[in-house]
Image (cartoon, grey):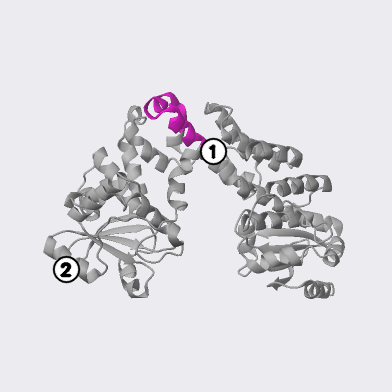
């Protein structure tokens, strides 16, 4: 599975620089071989004089993919010579105020980005995102032929050209220039033309991975049905990695509680996994195990499974899964102690900022005197409140909201609030950007965070408190509500 992330990590973890002083310091320097000009006026003048298109490298020091391209592409002398032969090469600081109009004109807001202009300043080609050699050079070569510029390909498609080789190239050009809606249309047409017996051929594989984004997609099912033929052409590792990464993407939201647990859905995924003929040692089975134990609230088994699996294939995702344990609510003390011990152990050698996330999760779990938020759905909380003669309190928050985090750390753990809530409320925390919170946000028209709702057991809003409060002020406002 690590191979799946390799291309992302290549351009996400580099710190190498360019002409301007970099915030990354000396470690950011790269031996760039490109011969650049530094103004549009000079580039367009040379373009007309030498009858060459203009290649634009839109650069920002904060954009790590830009640095990656310097180190792995623009420092290659052979490539730089080819560029000098075929293009006028223009370097543009995309965040400089004097270039704001150019950035807007050519929509160069996503970085890294590389644009090719003809001698009249018309954009004829665009590549968004980093690429390695020789792929980057092969793509740029398409811009040198009028038939394979963006306009040339559009014209050929509109005239009815539909051979498979043309469609593959057209899809590539559309995707790398961020025209995903059009590329989806062309891919649908492409696969309507590919004979089923030819699907496993290697030239189709990249486009299958673009199209088959979940296990219910018809193309994904074709891979499952004809796995031996795909393995023969693409290799066992490639096919197994694709299958496991697809199921990984479906399980992860449940494993991290981004989605509420759905036992039927998880069972269906397990049965599909068994039919996929993936080896039992594949990491996705570990994720299935963690998902199942978390959904069943078997926390001792969950922690046992996390200890077993998270230092291996899932090391990239370990912190994501670990810190969400702090969101667990209504835990028995024995389970709480097991999870706190695990998180304390996992964070023992960490530095900030990762350490801060673990500390927050541990604080949430160690809060035994403050407000005890229930692990209930909205409807379940109303029923519980009605049965116990209480009202429902909902903390409507988002993960990025600073005041929400402050209340969670400094206000909700207070014993005075805890004592009051045990008598008067069934308390819920709802992330307004995931799961049930999305619909509740619409239902109650939540647009500012935190918003604290107090509801009658029939769902009627008693009051809403918008914005953070200290302990005394919140307690005072809640006591006033008793009079309503």
Label annotation for residue 162: none
Disc 2 secondary structure class: helix
Quadrant housing residue 34:
bottom left
Q: Is residue 461 above or below residue 172?
A: below
- The residue singled out by tag 1 in the image is 247
- Where is 301 relative to 480, above or below? above
Q: Is residue 34 left or right of residue 441?
A: left
Residue at left offset 71%, top offset 53%: 326
Residue 136 visible in this rendered orientation of the protein? yes
* Residue 292, visible in the rendered structure: no
Name the main secondary structure of what is drawn in magenta: helix
In x, y percent, where is residue 337?
Answer: 80, 47
Q: Residue at x 73, y 45 (%)?
A: 342
Q: Position of residue 146 (x, y in %)?
A: 17, 52
Q: CA distance from mark 2 to mark 1?
A: 53 Å
Q: Nearer the viewer, residue 21 or 475?
A: 21
Does the magenta portion include 159? no
Q: Is residue 407 left or right of residue 154?
A: right
Neighbour class for label 2 at 10 Å: few (<14), some, many (≥20)?
some
The C terminus lies in quadrant: bottom right
First reached walking from the N terminus: tag 2 or tag 1: 2
Q: Please name the residue shown 66% across and 49% down the image.
A: 349
On screen, residue 400 versus residue 22, left or right, reads right
Say which element carries label 1. helix
How many marks on residues? Answer: 2
Residue 239: x and y in percent read 45, 32
Question: Which circle marks residue 45 in the picture?
Answer: 2
- Tell me which segment is drawn in magenta: 221-244
Q: Is residue 479 left or right of residue 205?
A: right
Tell me where residue 15 appears, x and y as whole percent: 44, 56
């Amino acid at each position: 599975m690590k191979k799946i992330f390799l291309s992302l990590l290549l351009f996400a973890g580099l710190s190498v620089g360019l002409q301007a002083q970099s915030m990354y310091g000396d470690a950011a320097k790269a031996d760039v071989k490109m011969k650049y000009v530094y103004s549009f006026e000079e580039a367009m003048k040379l373009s007309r004089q030498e009858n060459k298109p203009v290649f634009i490298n839109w650069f920002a020091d904060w954009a790590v993919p830009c640095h990656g391209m310097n180190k792995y592409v623009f420092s290659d002398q052979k490539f730089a010579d080819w560029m000098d032969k075929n293009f006028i090469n223009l370097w543009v600081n995309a965040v400089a105020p004097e270039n704001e109009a150019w950035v807007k004109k050519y929509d160069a807001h996503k970085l890294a980005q590389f644009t090719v202009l003809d001698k009249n300043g018309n954009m004829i080609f665009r590549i968004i995102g980093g690429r390695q050699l020789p792929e980057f050079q092969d793509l740029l070569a398409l811009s040198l032929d009028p038939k394979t510029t963006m306009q040339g390909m559009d014209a050929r498609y509109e005239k009815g050209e539909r051979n498979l080789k043309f469609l593959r190239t057209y899809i590539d050009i559309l995707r790398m220039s961020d025209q995903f809606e059009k590329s989806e249309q062309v891919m649908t047409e492409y696969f309507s033309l590919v004979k089923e017996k030819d699907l496993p051929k290697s030239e189709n594989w990249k486009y299958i991975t673009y199209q088959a984004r979940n296990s219910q997609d018809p193309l994904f099912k074709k891979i499952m049905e004809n796995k031996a033929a795909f393995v023969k052409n693409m290799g066992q590792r490639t096919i197994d990695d694709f299958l496991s990464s697809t199921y990984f993407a479906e399980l992860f939201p449940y494993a991290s509680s981004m989605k509420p647990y759905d036992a039927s859905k998880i069972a269906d995924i397990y049965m599909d996994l068994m039919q996929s003929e993936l080896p039992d040692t594949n990491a996705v089975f570990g994720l299935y195990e963690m998902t199942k134990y978390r959904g069943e609230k078997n926390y001792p088994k969950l922690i046992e499974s996390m200890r077993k699996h998270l230092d291996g294939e899932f090391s990239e995702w370990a912190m994501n899964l670990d810190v969400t344990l702090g969101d667990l609510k209504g835990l028995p003390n024995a389970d709480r102690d097991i999870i706190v011990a695990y998180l304390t152990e996992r964070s023992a050698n960490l530095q900030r900022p990762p350490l801060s996330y673990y500390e927050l999760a541990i604080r949430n779990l160690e809060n035994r005197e403050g407000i005890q938020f229930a692990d209930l759905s909205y409807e379940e909380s109303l029923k519980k409140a009605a049965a116990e003669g209480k009202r429902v309190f909902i903390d409507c928050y988002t993960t990025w909201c600073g005041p929400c985090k402050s209340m969670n750390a400094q206000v909700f753990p207070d014993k005075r609030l805890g004592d009051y809530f045990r008598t008067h409320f069934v308390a819920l925390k709802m992330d307004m950007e995931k799961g049930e919170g999305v619909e509740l946000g619409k239902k109650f028209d939540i647009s500012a965070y935190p918003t604290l709702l107090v509801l009658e057991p029939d769902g009627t809003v008693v009051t809403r408190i918008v914005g953070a409060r200290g302990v005394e002020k919140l307690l005072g406002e809640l006591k006033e509500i008793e009079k309503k």
